[in-house]
Amino acid sequence: MLLLALILVPAVAALGASALRGPARRTPWLLLGAMTHLALVAAVAITPPRPVFHGWIALDALGLVVLATVSALFAAVAVYAVGYLRRAHSPGGRAFVGCLLAFLAAASLVALSHHFALLWVGLEATTLALAPLIFHKHDRRSLEAVWKYLVISSVGIALALLGVFFLATAQAGGPPGARPLVVEDLIAYADRLHPAWLQAAFVFLLIGFGTKMGLAPMHTWKPDTYGEAPSLVGALMAGGLTSCAFLGLARVTAVATAAGSGPFIRPLLLGFGVLSLVVAAAFLIVQTDVKRLLAYSSVEHMGLLAVGLGVGGVGAYGAVLHMINNAMVKGLLFFAVGNAVLRAGTGAPAALSGALRRAPASGFLLLVGLFAVTGSPPFGPFLSEFAILGALFHAGHYWIAAIMLALFAVIFVGLAARILEVVHGPPSPSAPGVGEDPWRLAAPAVLAIAVLTLGVFIPGPLFRALAEAAGTLGGGAP
Amino acid sequence: MTWSAVAAVVMLFVIAPLVPGIAAKTKARLAGRRGAPVLQLYWDLSRLWRKGAVYSRTTTWVFRVAPVALVATAGAATCLVPLDGARAILSFSGDFVAFAYLLALGRFLLVLAALDTGSSFEGMGASREVTVAAFAEPALFLAFVAVVVASGETSLSGALGAALAGAWPTAAPALAMVAVSLFLVLLAEGSRVPVDDPATHLELTMIHEVMVLDHSGQDLALVLYGSALKLSLFAALLVGVVAPRAALPPLVALPALVAGIVVAAVAIGIVESVTARLRLGRVPQFLTAASALAALGVILLLAGSGT
Amino acid sequence: MTLFFLGVVLLLLGGAAAALLPRRRAADAGFAALAGGGCAAAAAPALWALAGGTVADLRITAAVPGGDWVFGIDPLSAFFLVIVCAVGAASVLYGVPYLATERAHRSVRVAHLLTAIEIAALALVVVARSAMPFLIAWEVMAVLAYFLVVFESERVAVRRAGLIYLIGTHTGTLALIALFAYWGQLAGGLSFAALAAAAPMLPASGALVFTLGLAGFGFKAGLVPLHFWLPGAHGAAPSHVSALMSGVVIKMGIYGLLRLVTLVGPPPVWWGWLVLAVGLASGVLGVLWALAQHDLKRLLAYHSVENIGIILLGLGVGALGARYDAPVVAVLGYAGAALHTLNHALFKSLLFLGAGAVLHATGTREIDRLGGLARRMPFTWTAFLVGSVAIVGLPPLNGFVSEWVVYQALIRSADVSPARAAVFGVAGLALIGALALACFAKVCGAVFLGQPRTSAAEGGREVGYGMLGPMFVLAAACVVIGLVPLVAVAPALRVGALVGGVGTAAVNDGLAAVAPALRRITVLAFALVGSVAGGAWLMRLASRRRTQTSSETWGCGYERPSVRMQYTAASFAAPLLAAYGPSAGVQVTREHGAFHTHPLDLVLDKLVLPLWTRLRNWAISVRPIQQGRLWVYLLYLLGALVALLLYLALQLERVSW
Amino acid sequence: MTRVAELLLLLVILTSFLALGTARVSACIRAVALQGLLLGLLPLALYPAGGAHIWGLAVGTVLVKAVVLPRFLNWAIREAAVRREVEPRVGYPMSLLVGVAAVAAAFAISSRLPLPEQAHEMLVPAALATVMLGLFMLTTRSKAVVQVVGYLILENGVYLFGLTHVERVPFLVEVGVLLDVFVAVFIMGIVVFHINREFDSLDSSHLSALSD
């Protein structure tokens, strides 16, 4: 029952939010919903509940990790939103909170559904729930952004649906008892899946979920969207949406691996991963718009996730861990950048230079984010990237490892040059924007602490969950 | 430490001012002049010692200490060379490094003294001095490496001892090259023609002499003596390489050393009278040639020792 | 070990005190006392270990994969720990008065805090016995150093230098991460013990590990050609931080290399030769570039490159000795490297502190705008002179001792027939020494001697005791090691034996090889000092009875010599650079009557930046990929789909079903 | 009954061609509405012995794909006075040829694929063909509304494939899918409406300000 609550509570809250009038009431409502969800997640984490709907809705380690990540990130977003909505007067204010909560519901559905079609439904729902938020500003640019976002990800997701049906077709030869499209049964009777259909399904699902993750060359919507969306929406997309898409990809990877199609899928995942890294690097080093910068950084990290899945072994563990870290770090970065934009009063690249000289706390957090996102010890991403790197060496992919390291160096230069300029560049005489705000500092601060903690301390339960998740992906923990 | 070693050092201290004199005399004779007496430098020194000194207001204590340090370092270096052929007063593995660096210390302080005056002439001299030294140093060390390799000993006393004498017959060409390069280094370190010209009196062309323009009285005496000591020291070193005398009893070895030094001084005189002074730009070339010569010697020796 | 961690805690408390205590005086006092005490406390176990005692390891059960976090102090760690603590304490004490004037417009408290954490991180780097804590401490050290470098971040040059530093160090860290990731997955654990146990499994006798190590640690050590970040950063940082960075931080690269060799065992031959060659290049090029500098601190920074070269000469010959089982050569080489690391830490930080004093007093770092400071800042001048004599490697100071040990190793390699070509390192080292002499003659002469060239130099006044004190302590250390080498050489030999992996017997061999020589060096040193002092005294007596007149400097008949006629530093270096410079990419030009040397860094300006521009241009050329038209984006998507379908088809052709 | 199904499938393909070939936006929308209707009828034809599940599916499909969405799209374009599709990137005759090629390819591929049992043999090729035509339309047309139509056709193709195992994929999921498509198109319609208001035209190629 808890499982359903996880989905229904935010859904109902979303409806309720659209009923409420005035942000003064809506923001507490949002906080309430977020915290309730977090509490529910804690509850299910402590006492694993029984699957419902004959196994379509269930909770396994992988799902739990994603669920917890999204829920935590969402809580931070809610906190940030309190300080943010206080400032941003915008026509979309009404639907804003509702859409946020709707996204949470959809994401929970994705995390909990062990039925591929249901997962697809949830994923599409997340896409749609975020669309109005991107259009928050109601200007031409955000209009263009949302249009591209909608069309590209809708096409991708449609192809994913085709992939789901292929999967069902592949399962046709299964035993009569097998529940169609249910992950457990797909894996249990993997040997009886039709290889050709399975592989075709994987191709379409990879394109579909890859589009939503933002793997190159399907990443094209990302910079535009992240660049235009409000920063907390950017956080939610870069941290939450991507995690959900990654979960989809991970599940189908698990099925394919179980079915012995590993040799078929690994090159694909590695290829897309490396390509994403290359593209991200190429666009990072000439990027002036900070939000677009973060978008390409997100492409880079999605590429890492793909590589981790593709290399398998400890890489799978690294990928799941990296999914968590990426969510936290992206949240942190988007919040800090959001503060910078508010401080400068505009998102124009020129104006942002030195914006955080006058907002040192946010500046500090942005720097933490910079070093965390570039995988410097002792932050969380370092551990996960370390694991992936080790897996690459272990699997003998020396060249991929070498390319990855070279690209890391290049990417670091791109990110550092721009972000350091924002933090202590020459301050630009711009319209004096908004100062710091406890809510808008609390959220990134908490995330910073989290990402630092994950770098030096992985709690036992989390580690077990990661190991189990990696196990389902045909890998293992170090 | 043996009495002969001490005696040898004392003797070198005494005869040091002789060397420039002999060189000058030779030069004069070859030019058909009578030239200044061989003992000229002694008279100069004693006269200077009685003179008072003039100090520039710009100078600091460095200017006063430098001359003393010059003599002191040269003296200390003397204690490291086995003048009696057998054993130096102070001998230890790798003492040749100390030898070279002691002389370098003296040079360093003298250069600082020159810069202390703030005179552009002395600055120029100092600049040239360090430049020449920078080229001479590798050659000197290569010569040391050569004798070390030839003898298998790592201290000067050992390297210039019996083992070297034993090496001569087998490795004559290599050691000869080393000796020649050492002689070239001597010319440079002693600031003689073709590198420098002590006799000239046009400041713009001088190196060592212009560096000490402001020194006067006792300071100048010390500087001159120090230079002379350095020169004779190199001469002694050269003698040690060319004619290892470890076998000889001290009573024979010491006269032999004197004779050798005189020969070296005459050689200097001859060189000075037959060659012209090089343009400053060519000096590096000259000394690089010395290094190359020594390096060749080392290579030959290594090739010999290896197989 | 507990004492050590107590020291670390004290350091951090000191930083906290500097940051938090309300009243300025209290903050400064608390910082100085606590941080200084921390250094002392942390150094104590190190000294104990160097004296031959053993310190128990500390093992913390790790909460992250990769095995426990182990901390330990063996001679190698101890040796470097002493360096960290000594220089750390000096720069802490110096920093308080040095930054006192900055309070108005900069966050000095934060700077002090960062300094304290930096020292703590350095200490942790050398005691870490497991890859995770090592990397963490390493990165903390590197990144904090960045923030200290950009202390004056409002200056664009400083920001640029900081960025280049950050890029350099991060690239190095990446190499290290790769190193441990590769080694760790082979060893199945990340504790150094596990790594060492797995060393025999490394293919090609650890070629990859040694390559990555040389790259990663080389970036930190600043060896040519990986030094390009160094001069800018060390020049831009506040002087006491420069002292810390030049004295200690870059030495962590040396520590890393030594530790690597300790863990893996004798490196392959090519590595030894490579290190030797790199050392030679770093030494010669470093000092040549230094000769061409006009900025006092940049000049000192390039001398760090030079000295790293000397250290690498020792390291390289030691590696060769170890490979060709000539234990004495190995021990002497490694020991020489370690010892020179210590000595360079002492005199280089001393020199940077002196430069800081000059900057503090005159407000300029331009050598050719200074002069005549010897009269105005006599104590600083004395300390600086000691440092200069030491760095040039002249007796009777410590620089001579360590160079002498390196010479020993090089000369003894002649007996090891496969490695005997290494004796030519002697000539290289001699050249380096001679050039360094020239360079420091230039510095001392132009900055301290002669007459002040500008009013800034005219107005220079001696700095306070708070800044002089640390300088004199360091100077005293230089003198002591110079006069009584055994105190430093014995522990260095222990380190060498550990790194060479030849056990204590070799220590005794090494000692037997050098101990008598060292005693004689002591005799020589004392004799020299005594004779100079005595001679000077005698001269004073003698000159009493002579007339002494003082006048203007003799201008060879020219009546009115002016300050502008003094030889400038550029002119002083001109002849040497004219001869050697072209090979090092230094031009010397004569513009309106004055020499000008144009120091451009061969690597940074000729290699790194052009490469980067090339890369950027490529990136710009591919930007149109993201050209904004939706249908093109959809075409990408379709393209990807079609490609995958083709791949699928090919696969299906193979798998017949 | 299979004949009927075959006929319906053919009609589906033809309606796609209709949408592809016409220059009139309204005609496009009408064509896709017709296609929705056919899709709604198909389950009945394919599974004559279908229970409430099939019927519900049919009704829902007709409702969403044939009635609501087309009307909504018409509303969305009403403000814009444009009736004709301005120069598509690929001319109409060309697009038709491409379409034919696509259909051929679809048949070729599906002939090599092992057919899922208990599915009509023309179902898979028809589905693939529709998907391809939809994609083709989506990429080549520059008018927002027509792109939405293309997306609908694409979705219809996928949906068509979904019919291969109606009873394996449970009802709830089908509804979810329908709902998603509905909302997606709804939001797209809103955006189209805004585009129309902002740029005074439905031409989405104005939307190329965001780029690197």
Image (cartoon, rainbow, N blue to C red):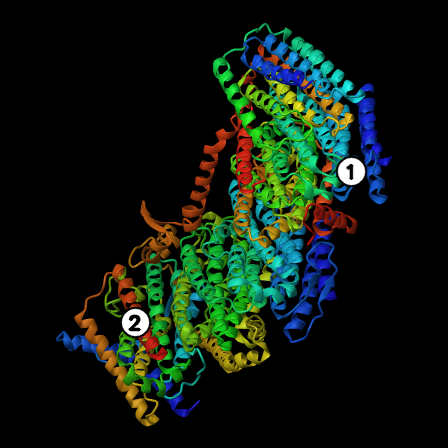
Q: Chain of mark 1?
A: A
The quarter of the picture where residue D25 lies is top right
Which is nearer the eye, C57 or B193? Answer: C57
Q: Look at label 2 and name its amino acid.
A: Leu
In the image as oriented, which residue stretches furthest toward the top? D81
Label at residue A177: 1
Q: Residues within 10 Å of mark 2 (few under 14, many from 20)?
A: some
Mark 2 or 1: in front is: 1
Quadrant of the image containing the C terminus of chain C: top right
Rendered residue at 41%/92% (across/down): B3
Measured as percent of width and height from the top left, residue A316 is found at: 66, 47
The quarter of the picture where residue B66 lies is bottom left
Which is nearer the eye, D208 or B93? Answer: D208
Marks 2 and 1 on same chain: no
Marks 2 and 1 sit apart, C-alpha to C-alpha, by: 89 Å
Mark 2, secondary structure of its residue:
helix
Q: Look at label 1 and name its amino acid.
A: Gly
Rendered residue at 71%/52% (across/down): A456
- Mark 2 in CB contact with mark 1 (< 8 angstroms): no
Side of C393 where A56 appears, left or right: right
Q: Residues within 10 Å of mark 1 (few under 14, many from 20)?
A: few
**C458 versus B45 height, above or below:** above
Answer whether residue A331 is visible to the viewer in this image. no
The quarter of the picture where residue C189 lies is bottom right
Which is nearer the eye, D145 or B176? Answer: D145
Measured as percent of width and height from the top left, residue A173 is found at: 69, 37
Answer whether residue C107 is visible to the viewer in this image. yes
Measured as percent of width and height from the top left, residue B134 is found at: 36, 64
Label at residue B296: 2
Q: Chain of mark 2?
A: B
